[in-house]
């Protein structure tokens, strides 16, 4: 067994070694399983001399207003740096030269392949294989809804938590699946060629819909394996299109979720605080079609000692949206605040 056989009350203590991994998973590079655009902070290479000259004449009372500064700074005097659009990268286009220069780390194709196959996409979150027997690690807040759906009558699953001491006690979660990214293909040329003859927006939309369906069917048939499905992802605000082919695992069972007082300690305010004192982890297990625990080709082994100060840490995940690709004109248009 890759889970300790102990009473649940002793389980969190025995899993204390997971804390460094959980912290690391909150930090990483990077490549997004289904990431639709870049995000993150960037190295600004704006020409300070010209920007300063443009804003020097602005009265202090006006310059104190951020909106005024935006209106009086000429956007055409700023030069974009290499990573001004962020530090998230797709698996098929990582800046390995930057990794070597910045972190003295040179990952090869096999490193990226194992990182890609070890990562998983749940319907609402990121997860990862963490054992050779299909054990899957994700966050507590990602598992709450699914865990609650397995509760028996009168059982307070979220309040009291759950731990399966044996595989027989693991509970299958209906409708929960885990997607593994198995192949990526750049299909930008194919999509753009299909749009060349379109004269109207409606024609472009229909041409795009048709070529996307064609690509999905073609790629799903070309990739070896079963239970495959392909999605065509628009990257960089439509400047590039990639076909992502996933293998879907549909037999996913609950192994452990801590009680809410431990797994959601501090509530939503602490969710946006660092350091965070929360055991924000849960475990599932993926089973194969033969009914036995899956033996994944790649997984992330536990590192009880965690990472060292100054060590490069990479995160593989399924991030949300970003506004990094918006233009100055788009940002200038007032929009209602987004709800939390």
Image: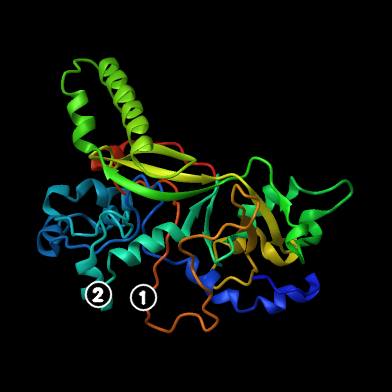
Residue 328 vs residue 50, the one in the foreground? 328
Residue 87 vs residue 138, the one in the foreground? 138
Q: Quadrant of the N terminus?
A: bottom right
Determine whether, in the image, residue 153 is placed left or right of residue 91.
right
Residue at (51%, 78%) from the top-left corner?
Answer: 303
Image vertical order of residue 272 relative to residue 172, above or below: below
Q: How is the image coloured?
A: rainbow
Determine whether, in the image, residue 29 is placed left or right of residue 177.
left
Badge 1 marks a residue whose secondary structure is loop
Residue beneath label 1, please? 312
- Tell whether label 1 touches label 2 (CB within 8 Å): yes
Residue at (86%, 52%) from the top-left corner?
Answer: 155
Q: Position of residue 57 (x, y in %)?
A: 15, 56
Residue 308 vs residue 128, the one in the foreground? 128
Q: Which mark is residue 102?
A: 2
Residue at (55%, 73%) from the top-left corner?
Answer: 275
């Amino acid at each position: 067994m890759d889970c300790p056989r102990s009473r649940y009350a002793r389980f969190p203590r025995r899993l204390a070694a997971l804390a460094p991994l959980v912290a690391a998973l909150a930090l990483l590079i990077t490549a997004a399983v289904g990431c639709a655009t870049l995000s993150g902070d960037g190295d600004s290479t704006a020409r300070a001399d010209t920007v300063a000259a443009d804003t020097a004449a602005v009265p202090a009372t006006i310059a104190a207003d951020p909106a005024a500064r935006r209106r009086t700074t000429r956007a055409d005097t700023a030069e974009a740096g290499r990573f001004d659009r962020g530090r998230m990268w797709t698996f098929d286009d990582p800046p390995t030269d930057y990794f070597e220069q910045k972190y003295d780390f040179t990952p090869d194709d096999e490193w990226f392949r194992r990182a890609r196959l070890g990562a998983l996409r749940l319907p609402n979150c990121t997860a990862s294989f963490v054992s050779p027997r299909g054990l899957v690690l994700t966050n507590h807040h990602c598992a709450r809804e699914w865990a609650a759906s397995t509760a028996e009558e009168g059982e307070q699953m979220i309040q009291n938590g759950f731990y399966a001491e044996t595989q027989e006690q693991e509970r299958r979660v209906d409708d929960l699946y885990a997607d593994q990214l198995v192949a990526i293909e750049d299909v930008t040329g194919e999509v753009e060629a299909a749009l060349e003859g379109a004269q109207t927006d409606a024609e472009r939309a229909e041409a795009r819909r048709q070529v996307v369906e064609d690509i999905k069917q073609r790629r799903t048939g070309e990739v070896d394996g079963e239970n495959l499905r392909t999605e065509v992802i628009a990257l960089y605000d439509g400047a590039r299109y990639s076909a992502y082919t996933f293998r879907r695992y549909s037999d996913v069972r609950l192994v452990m979720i801590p009680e809410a007082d431990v797994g959601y300690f501090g509530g939503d305010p602490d969710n946006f605080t660092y350091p965070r004192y929360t055991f924000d982890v849960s475990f599932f297990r993926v089973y194969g079609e033969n009914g036995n625990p899956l033996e994944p080709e790649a997984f992330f082994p536990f590192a009880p000692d965690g990472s060292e100060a100054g060590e490069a840490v990479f995160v593989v995940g399924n991030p949300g949206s970003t506004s990094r690709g918006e233009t100055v004109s788009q940002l200038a248009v007032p929009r209602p605040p987004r709800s939390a």
